Image (cartoon, helix red, strand yellow):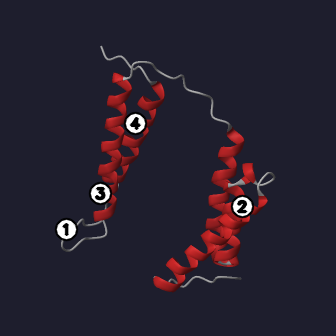
Amino acid sequence: MLRVADARKFWSGLLFAAIGAIALVALPRPIGSLISMGPGYFPMLLGSGLILIGLLSVGLSMTATEGDGIEIISLKPTLFIIGGIVAMAVLIEPAGLAASLLAMVLGTCHARLRQHPLEIAIIYLVVLALSWVVFIHFMQLPLKLFW
């Protein structure tokens, strides 16, 4: 019988492996080859990597000397992070890149906002500048910077 010494590593490994398996099974696009990569090549590599990481984590959970208990996840920070990402996805088209990134940074950095507002402002400006350079300047995506 297998003994799981570290439940956190075990369950996170199973989660990684499951997400990787879903990525591989739900791969409707042609993979192509290394020279001529198809649209399914990167998802195939990503799914395989997630399965590998998951199996490694499950293996390590069974060889751990002492396990840590699973803590209860605090729901408020999780909802703020997911809310910030969803707000960015909803706002990027009508409000532009700047406003959607502001919503994302404020949501994901909500816990540090009152104690370190200057740090959050710097994070926002760096993310905005990098996003503008990568997505609008280099990739020339048709994104508006402002509404």
Mark 1 crowd level (few <14, some 14–19, many ≥20, 10 Å Cα):
few
Q: Residue 53: name its quadrant.
A: top left
Q: State the residue at coordinates (73%, 66%).
A: 121
Q: State the residue at coordinates (67%, 71%).
A: 125
Does any portion of residue 51 appear in the rendered image? yes
The extreme top residue here reads 1
In the picture of the structure, the residue carrying the numbered disc 2 is 120
In the picture of the structure, the residue carrying the numbered disc 4 is 13
Placement of the C terminus among the 4 image quadrants: bottom right
Q: In 3D space, how far apart are the residues under numbered discs 4 and 2 (Cα atoms)?
A: 32 Å
- Amino acid identity at mark 4: Gly
Q: Earlier in the sequence, mark 2 or mark 1?
A: 1
Q: Earlier in the sequence, mark 3 or mark 4?
A: 4
Q: Nearer the viewer, mark 4 or mark 2?
A: 2
Q: Earlier in the sequence, mark 4 or mark 2?
A: 4
Q: Earlier in the sequence, mark 3 or mark 1?
A: 1
In the picture of the structure, the residue carrying the numbered disc 1 is 34
Q: In 3D space, how far apart are the residues under numbered discs 2 and 1 (Cα atoms)?
A: 41 Å
Query: Is residue 19 positioned above or below 100 on the image?
Result: above
Residue 38 appears left or right of 15:
left
